[in-house]
């Protein structure tokens, strides 16, 4: 896989993960007490839900789709420094979001 | 998941984390400081390694370590987190929430990290290579320290 596609995956997936936890868009929901996996919209199972797997799954889907649909000529124009700049922005967003615990 | 399997996975998770911590720290130092002509001292040898040689191992260790962490996560939520909540340890809970996000962002940045370190090294990626390595190192250090503190939190706070 070429560098451009890997870069696009990371940029889209990291942004997608941040949107997924912020707006709570899990692709699936796991209920550890019941040991059941549900999709959003299905009735809740017993016990508390875990959304983290679902947010990660949403992010991977967003990343794969973006890496698949962004044209190669756009990828070549993408500055590689965006990879770390976007990562820093996403880390700051996560720290700001979790400030509520402290 | 049985108790002995959980304990075994937790030990494996910790061992992988130690290996990852060593590899990413070594790479981060080497990519920032670079080689020095005189390789006599320990510090000079430490910074003079071929940083690109670590990339594959780091990707593998981070991915496998996170996958095992994901398997252990339900045990954390059902066993460890209620203890934190009952004892009013909100900051510890928050530190783990951050670890959770950093693990996800770390895994998702691995393709970009791999692109930056792929041989032959592309000069255009030099800044990205150093920055992504340092970001991944910061994530690994945070996750290691928080994981270690939370594992021992009963002994630390009681």
Image (cartoon, helix red, strand yellow):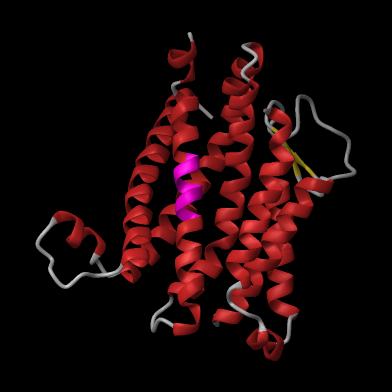
- Was residue B142 drawn as part of the magenta stretch in this picture? yes
B58 relative to A79, above or below: above
Residue at the top extreme of this rendering? B158
The residue sitting at the left extreme is B40
Q: Position of residue B152 (x, y in %)?
A: 44, 21
Q: Residue at x 57, y 28 (%)?
A: B75
The secondary structure making up most of the magenta span is helix
Which quarter shows the N terminus of chain B? top right
Q: Note whether A89 is above or below A99 in the view shown.
A: below
Place residue B50 in its image quadrant: bottom left
Q: Is residue B149 above or below residue B121?
A: above
User: In screen coordinates, is B52 left or right of A47?
Assistant: left
Q: Residue at x 60, y 15 (%)?
A: B83
Labels in figure, total: 0
Q: Nearer the viewer, residue A67 or B91?
A: B91
**Of the pair A26 and B55, the residue shown nearer to us:** B55
Q: Position of residue B126 (x, y in %)?
A: 45, 76
Most foreground residue, A66 or B35: B35
- Any part of residue B123 in sight: yes
Q: Residue at x 35, y 43 (%)?
A: B18
Q: Report if residue A27 is visible in the image.
A: no
Please report the bounds of the magenta region as a residue range. B136-143
Residue B108 horizontal/vertical position (percent):
60, 59
Q: Quadrant of residue A2?
A: bottom right
Residue A24, given in percent of the width and then of the height, sits at: 82, 45
């Amino acid at each position: 896989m070429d560098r451009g596609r890997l870069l696009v995956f990371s940029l889209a997936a990291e942004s997608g993960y941040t949107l997924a936890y912020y707006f709570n868009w899990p692709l699936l929901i796991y209920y550890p007490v019941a040991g059941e996996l549900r999709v959003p919209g299905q009735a809740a199972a017993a016990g508390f839900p875990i959304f983290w797997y679902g947010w990660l799954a949403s992010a991977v889907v967003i990343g794969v789709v973006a890496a698949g649909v962004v044209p190669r000529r756009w990828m070549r124009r993408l500055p590689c420094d965006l990879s770390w700049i976007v990562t820093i922005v996403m880390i700051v967003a996560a720290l700001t979001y979790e400030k509520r615990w402290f | 998941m049985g108790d002995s399997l959980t304990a075994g996975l937790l030990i494996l998770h910790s061992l992988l984390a130690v290996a990852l911590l060593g590899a990413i720290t070594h790479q981060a130092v080497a990519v920032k400081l670079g080689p020095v002509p005189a390789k006599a001292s320990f510090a000079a040898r430490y910074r003079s390694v071929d940083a690109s040689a670590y990339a594959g191992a780091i990707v593998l260790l981070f991915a496998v370590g996170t996958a095992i962490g994901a398997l252990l996560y339900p045990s954390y939520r059902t066993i460890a987190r209620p203890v934190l909540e009952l004892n009013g340890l909100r900051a510890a809970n928050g530190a783990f929430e951050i670890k959770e996000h950093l693990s996800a962002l770390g895994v998702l940045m691995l393709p970009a990290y791999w692109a930056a370190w792929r041989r032959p090294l592309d000069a255009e990626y030099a800044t990205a290579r150093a920055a992504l390595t340092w970001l991944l190192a910061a994530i690994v250090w945070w996750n290691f320290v928080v994981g270690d503190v939370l594992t021992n939190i009963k002994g630390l706070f009681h």
